[in-house]
Image (cartoon, rainbow, N blue to C red):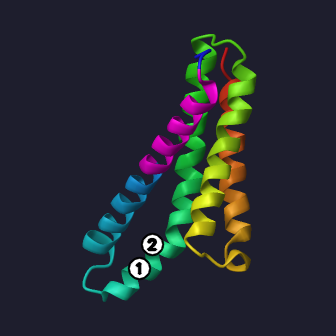
Amino acid sequence: MKKYVILKLIGLAILTMITLVVISFIEVAVYSYLINPGQEQSFYEAHVNSSAPYISGIFGFIVFFLIARYWKKKEYQNVFKLVILFPLIYVLIDIIIITAAGVKWSDFILIFAIANAAKFLGSFLGYKLTI
C-alpha cells in the first residue's frame, strides 16, 4: 500500500460509494415491492431522497469500520494515516458529486454531516477496537 496511496484511497472511496448506492437501491426495491407496493413513481423517488442519507450513514459506518479493522489486522504501515485519509477523501468526493448535482446544501447539510461523521467514527473505531 506504499505506492500511490492517495490514488488507491480514491478508488476505494469510489468503490465504497458504489456499494452504498447499491445498498440504497436494494432498500428501495424491498420497500417498493414488499413493504409499500402500488404507489406512484414520485412516491418512491421521495422515499429514496429521504432514506438514502440514513442508509449511507448506517452502512457507511459498517463499511468504514470493517476496512479500518482489516488494515489494522494486516498491520499496514501508517495505518492511522489511512484511517483518517480514507473517510476524508470519501467526503471530498461526496462534496464534489453533490455540488455538481446542484443539491441545495441548506436542505441537506445536517444529515450530510451526521452520515459522514458516522463514517469517520466507523473508521476510527475499526482502528481502535482491533487488537
Residue 110 belongs to magenta span? no
Relative to 23, say whether 5 is above or below: above
Q: Where is residue 7 in the image (x, y as percent from the top left)?
A: 57, 32
Query: Which residue sits at x=59%, y=14%?
Result: 73
Q: Position of residue 21 (x, y in %)?
A: 43, 56
Instruction: Give the side of residue 46 with respect to residue 74, left or right.
Output: left
Which quadrant of the figure contains the N terminus? top right
Residue 15 belongs to magenta span? yes
Main SS of the magenta part reads helix
Instruction: Give the side of residue 9 with respect to residue 35, left or right.
Output: right
Amino acid type at mark 2: Val
User: Badge 2 is on which residue?
Assistant: 48
Q: Is mark 2 on a helix, strand or loop?
A: helix
Relative to 41, say whether 123 is above or below: above
User: Marks 1 and 2: CB-CB under 8 Å?
Assistant: yes
Q: Where is residue 54 in the image (x, y as percent from the top left)?
A: 57, 62
Badge 2, how many Cα within 10 Å: few under 14, some, many 20+? some
In this orientation, does residue 103 appear?
A: yes
Q: How far apart are marks 1 and 2 (CA)?
A: 5 Å
Which quadrant of the figure contains the C terminus? top right
Q: Is mark 1 on a helix, strand or loop?
A: helix
Badge 1, how many Cα within 10 Å: few under 14, some, many 20+? few
User: Badge 1 is on which residue?
Assistant: 45
The magenta stretch is 4-19
Please tell me in which quadrant of the rendered image residue 108 appears.
bottom right
Amino acid type at mark 1: Glu
Query: Which residue sits at x=39%, y=86%?
Result: 43
Instruction: Give the side of residue 12 with respect to residue 69, left or right.
Output: left
Query: Which residue sits at x=74%, y=34%?
Result: 84
